[in-house]
Image: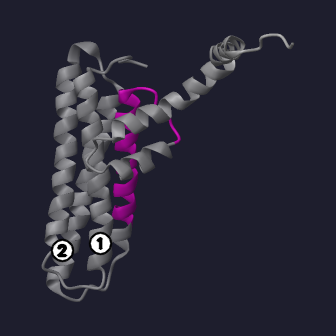
């Protein structure tokens, strides 16, 4: 008769392994991904949020990290679009040129507002948290308005570049909308668990 190596022994081995340093390291390694996943689920564009923030190379351990990462993604995309818009030339109709000129200015303003937002998020302080979050929300909302205004300017333009411009601006507006969502989440959490780091 063999010794009773039963369910009790298997349970003991499982519990020992699950509390080992290796499993703790695996859980802490997955924590940023879990935070991204749980934070993106209710974003305006959850799949885009998950894709852009999961591939983000910086830290993503707190709601503050995620808000900063979302704003950085938005800034990078807006700069890319700004560079693209500046390469467009040869638009023949005045309406096209005016729409492009306005759009270049609006995207430039968006980058500026998003950059101010990032600066504010990097220097959050307990005593001025509410005021700083209000600034961040205002600036990101203004950036979104600029991006929407740029899209509106191309609404009645017939141009080969129109579809490409609309696609690129829409993408920037979506990541900016997700950034605003992350900032609102941060505001609701009051910057916890860690405000400053």
Q: 4 or 150, which lies in front?
A: 4
Percent from the top left, x then y, of residue 152? 14, 68
Percent from the top left, x then y, of residue 31? 50, 28
Q: Which residues are magenta?
A: 57-83
**Dividing the image into 4 quarters, which one contains the C terminus?**
top left
Q: Which residue has dot 2 on it?
A: 154
Asked if 181 appears above or below 148 in the picture, the reply is above
Q: 16 or 91, which lies in front?
A: 16
- Which disc number belongs to residue 165? 1
- Which disc number belongs to residue 105? none
Tell me the crowding category of disc 1: few under 14, some 14 to 19, or many 20 or more residues within 10 angstroms, Cα based. Answer: many
Q: Residue at x 29, y 17 (%)?
A: 125
The secondary structure making up most of the magenta span is: helix
- Give the mark nearest the N terminus, 1 or 2: 2
Q: Residue at x 25, y 40 (%)?
A: 181
Percent from the top left, x then y, of residue 52? 43, 49
Q: 44 or 170, which lies in front?
A: 44
Q: Secondary structure at mark 1?
A: helix
Q: Residue at x 41, y 38 (%)?
A: 37
User: Marks 1 and 2: CB-CB under 8 Å?
Assistant: yes
């Amino acid at each position: 008769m063999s010794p009773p190596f039963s369910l009790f022994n298997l349970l003991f081995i499982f519990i020992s392994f699950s509390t080992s340093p290796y499993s703790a390291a695996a859980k802490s390694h997955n924590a940023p991904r879990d935070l991204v996943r749980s934070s993106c689920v209710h974003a305006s564009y959850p799949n885009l949020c998950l894709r852009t923030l999961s591939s983000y190379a910086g830290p993503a351990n707190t709601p503050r990290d995620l808000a900063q990462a979302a704003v950085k993604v938005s800034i990078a995309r807006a700069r890319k679009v700004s560079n693209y818009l500046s390469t467009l030339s040869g638009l023949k109709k005045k309406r096209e040129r005016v729409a492009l000129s306005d759009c270049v200015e609006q995207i430039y303003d968006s980058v500026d507002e998003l950059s101010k937002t990032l600066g504010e998020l990097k220097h959050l302080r307990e005593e001025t948290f509410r005021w700083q979050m209000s600034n961040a929300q205002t600036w990101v909302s203004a950036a979104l308005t600029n991006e929407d205004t740029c899209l509106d300017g191309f609404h009645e333009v017939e141009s080969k570049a129109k579809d490409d411009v609309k696609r690129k601006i829409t993408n920037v507006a979506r990541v900016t909308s997700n950034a605003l969502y992350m900032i609102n989440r941060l505001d609701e959490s009051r910057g916890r668990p860690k405000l400053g780091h």
